[in-house]
Image: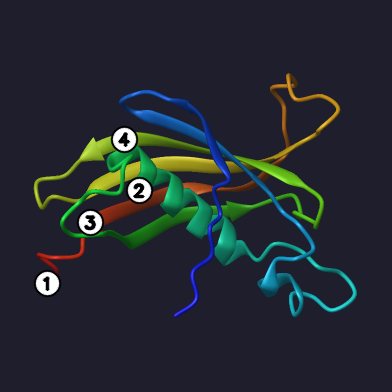
Amino acid sequence: MMHFTLIDRVIERSDHNLIAIKHVSNAEEYLQDHFPGFPVLPGVMMLEAMTQAARKLIDPDDNSDSPWVLCQAKALKYGAFVRPGSTIRVSIDRHKDNDDGSIDFKGDVRLIDPDNQQDTEHPVACSGRITLRPMTGAS
């Protein structure tokens, strides 16, 4: 089983929000085929980055008895291409705890200009809403 870590470092955390960064390098396996001659971070990997950030918000020490899994993605929008050499900022907000034990989040992935990290208008590469649930208790 392959596992891709799409969070290099958590840079900010509160009870309901987490911000992390990831540097996308040429060494990322999945860039070899997506796309030949014009490598870009696949959209599904940006979704996975938001999912990993949500997991780190729920379970910072990875001590949960049952892993949190993505069970729904809504309103996904893709914008800027993420090329090798780029740095992305992944932001996730805990939106709602549901009666069935799942948790709704809002998130986005933005391109960070390494020369201007204080700029608040980073281009959006991906945004949307996701829901995670514990793996046990699946219906």
- Pointer 1 residue: 139
Type of amino acid under label 2: Arg
Of labels 4 and 3, earlier in sequence is 4
- Pointer 2 residue: 55
Q: CA distance from mark 1 to mark 2?
A: 20 Å
**Which of the two residues, 38 or 87, is positioned nearer the viewer here?**
87
Q: CA distance from mark 1 to mark 4?
A: 23 Å
Type of amino acid under label 3: Arg
**From the viewer's perspective, is residue 52 above or below residue 26?**
above
Graded by Cα atoms within 10 Å as few (under 14), some (14 to 19) or many (20 or more), the crowding at tag 1 reads few
Of labels 1 and 4, earlier in sequence is 4
Callout 3 secondary element? strand
Residue at 29% of width from left, 41% of height from top? Answer: 58
Which label sits in the foreground, 1 or 2?
Answer: 2
Asked if disc 3 and disc 1 are in contact, CB closer than 8 Å, the reply is no
Q: Quadrant of residue 69?
A: bottom left
Type of amino acid under label 1: Ser
Q: Is residue 92 left or right of residue 45?
A: left
Tally of numbered tags: 4
Callout 2 secondary element? helix
Q: CA distance from mark 2 to mark 4?
A: 14 Å
- Pointer 4 residue: 95
* Place of residue 22 in the rendered image (x, y in percent of width and height, measured from the top left): 63, 46
Q: Quadrant of residue 116?
A: top right
**From the viewer's perspective, is residue 87 above or below residue 76?**
above
Which mark, residue 133?
3
